[in-house]
Image (spheres, rainbow, N blue to C red):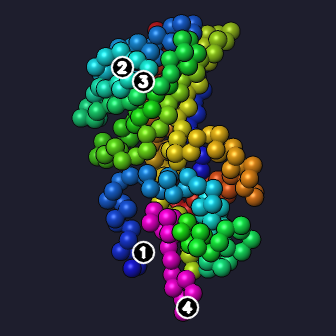
Amino acid sequence: MSREDRRPVTRKRHTNAPGFAALGDETRLSLVAKLCSGQPCSISQLTHGSRLTRQAITKHLRVLESAGIVHCRRTGRESRFEFDPEPMVEMKRYLNLVSEQWDQALSRLKSFVER
Amino acid sequence: MNHTIEKRIELKAPVSRIWRALTDHREFGEWFGVKLDGPFVPGQISRGQITIPGYQHIKWEAVVQKMEPERLFSFTGHPHAVDPQIDYSGETPTLVEFRLEKTAAGTLLVVTESGFDKIPSDRRLEAFRENEGGWTQQMKNIESYVARRP
């Protein structure tokens, strides 16, 4: 499945919960940190230097994949995983909106108690 | 990406006044923009209807957690209706905490909203210690990466 086929599904659900949940794990976060700072990586490359097994890393990658944060590309016999910033950009946008709403609510509180 | 929102605001009114504005459900409703069905009671669900123009079709629902007089008021839920076109009920309920502190000018109010990623802060600390490079550093790296993208 291409990236274009997959993306609209995430968008239609209009929820960032899978993204937040996917990143709510230190192993997955470190995988994202590795992938976002460099080239697409194979599972072996991502397993290298980790205390986890190849299977465990693969499982974590699948969670990230289902949240749209990484995509798997097959080249020959090897699968490479690459980072897609879009879900995180969307999560950041959501957090910014929540933050703005607090600013507005607290300025209303200020005028309410200081009047 | 920082998954906790923190706001600090200095208010020129005594702590007791702020406490009332936060925990009296009618007063809370006035500034927050919600018509609540009844008073806040720890452990109980608070229900109501958002009154902010454009968002009136959105229901408010939260579970009151702590009410430590003039110190701490907290609840879990989906307090914000960010976009009226979008149903946010699928989002993870977050924890909202209001902390009050007496200052020379009145009251310092610190509001935090956390739990977007379902991780309690003590586990985050543990992860920070264990993780090579550190959790915070990784979040910073990812954030700067994401920020570079349009």
Q: What is the distance, in whole Å, between disc 4 and disc 1 at their CAs?
A: 20 Å
Q: Is residue B114 left or right of residue B61?
A: right
**Where residue A86 sits: x, y (%)?**
48, 62
First reached walking from the N terminus: tag 4 or tag 1:
1
Task: Choose mark 3 or mark 1, whichever is in front.
Answer: 3
Confirm whether residue A37 shows in the render. Answer: no
Gap in angstroms between the C-alphas marked 2 and 3: 19 Å
Question: How far is disc 4 from disc 3 in space, using C-alphas?
Answer: 55 Å
Provide the residue designation for mark 3.
B43
How far across and down, in percent of the image, does residue B147 sit?
59, 56
* SS type, badge 3: loop
The CA distance from mark 2 to mark 4 is 60 Å
Element carrying mark 1: helix
Circle number at residue A77: 4
Mark 1 packing: few (<14 Cα in 10 Å), some, or many (20+)?
Answer: few
Residue range (magenta) = A61-79
Contact flag, marks 4 and 3 (Cβ < 8 Å): no
- CB atoms of marks 2 and 4 within 8 Å: no
- Which residue is rendered at x = 63% and y = 56% of the image? A26
Question: Which kind of residue does numbered mark 3 sit on?
Answer: Gly
Q: Chain of mark 2?
A: B
